[in-house]
Amino acid sequence: MTGEHELDELDRRLVAALQLDGRAPWHLVARAVGVSESTVQRRFAALRARDAARVIGVVDVLRCGLGVPVLVRVSCRPGTAEEVAGRLAARSEARFVAVLTGGADAAAEFVVPTHRDLTRLLVQDMPGREELTETETFTVMRTFISAHDWDTGLLDAQAGAMLRPEPVRPFEDQVWERPPDRLDDLELAIAAHLGQDGRMPVKELAGRVGASESTVARRVDSMVARGCLRFRTLVDPTLLGFAVEFMLWLDIHPAHLEAAGRQLAGHPGIKYLSATAGRFNLCGQVSLRHFADLYRFTTDVVGALPGVRRADTTLQLDTLKRAWVPTPPRRLAETVDERSSR
């Protein structure tokens, strides 16, 4: 019998479908997973009620001129990593925070208004700085793949083609062609509500922002088409059968950076990958099904990349924040770990 927080096969397929398109109509989700529309609605409501999965709207901050993303990895005094990570996660600028083991103790992604604001954040207001022994900053130059682009591989290609929208070119590729696409007050209000519930019905959304349903529907479609708004399904990868999550930090020869980034972004385990300015110029997040897969990933995937000069792997021990949202209690993943070890 399925435990309180364990996902069965149908739950996993449902989450995989929503990861492909978090706001897809329920009838399409039902077709993709092979059950009735009422069943997928009921299943998702149950997952949402117990914080096992949720869909949120995510605004592309670069495309909309709302800030610039920066990765920070820190080393801490022994025994203080969780405390430091908790302080980092408490910052409103923090979009992602994880406790690591390996070459660093914690990592965070901050979104700041401009690069000049890094001085205030990293020097004046850095949380837990009395516990830090080293910090490194990596400014994101180009995003190859974001977490909302990740395909879990739990559904077949036909379902993927039915659900996954056409990819939108990264804004970094277009920055010289046009200025950021600024959202107006109505679009910002819509995005804020979808950031809490990405599947909020248009009728409810219209009532909350004080606009007609047709206007709200058009604005949502417009933001998606422009690449300003994407939908992401938040779930602990462990619940989907991915036992290992880690961050990958690569130093690539500049002449091979574009080729290496594109090649690595094509691997199914890559959830996030960006080119960065700093000691490591290609930084990513990876999910694998088994710890044993890490060796082959290192030799066959990283080892096959052009221009690799140095590689560092830091396992994620705990993730405190994803896409601005604090993660559910760790007991969700621990339940699956305990059951799988019996």
Image: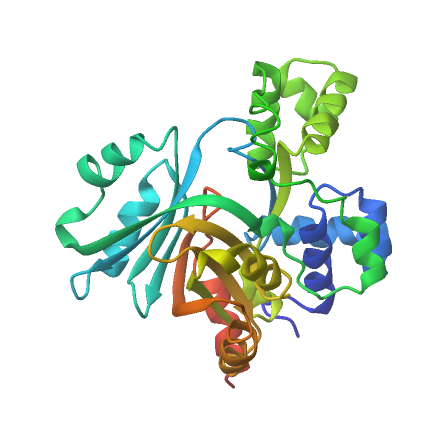
Name above or below for residue 130 compared with residue 236.
above
Q: Nearer the viewer, residue 165 or 84?
A: 165
Q: Is residue 274 left or right of residue 191?
A: left
Residue 329 drawn at (x, y percent): 43, 57
Query: How many marks do you count on the picture?
Result: 0
Q: Residue at x 30, y 53 (%)?
A: 85
Q: Residue at x 51, y 33 (%)?
A: 61
Quadrant that contains the N terminus: bottom right
Q: Nearer the viewer, residue 240 or 162?
A: 162
Residue farthest along the bottom direction in this orientation: 342
Residue farthest along the left direction in this orientation: 130
Name above or below for residue 73 compared with residue 186.
below
Q: Does residue 38 show up?
A: no
Q: Residue at x 61, y 41 (%)?
A: 170
Image quarter for residue 219? top right
Q: Nearer the viewer, residue 92 or 339?
A: 92
Q: How is the image coloured?
A: rainbow
Residue farthest along the front direction in this orientation: 255
Q: Does residue 219 show up?
A: yes
Q: Is residue 68 left or right of residue 240?
A: left
Q: Is residue 290 left or right of residue 119?
A: right
Residue 49 drawn at (x, y percent): 59, 49
Q: Residue at x 59, y 28 (%)?
A: 191
Residue 195 drawn at (x, y percent): 56, 35
Name above or below for residue 3 compared with residue 183.
below
Residue 340 drawn at (x, y percent): 54, 80
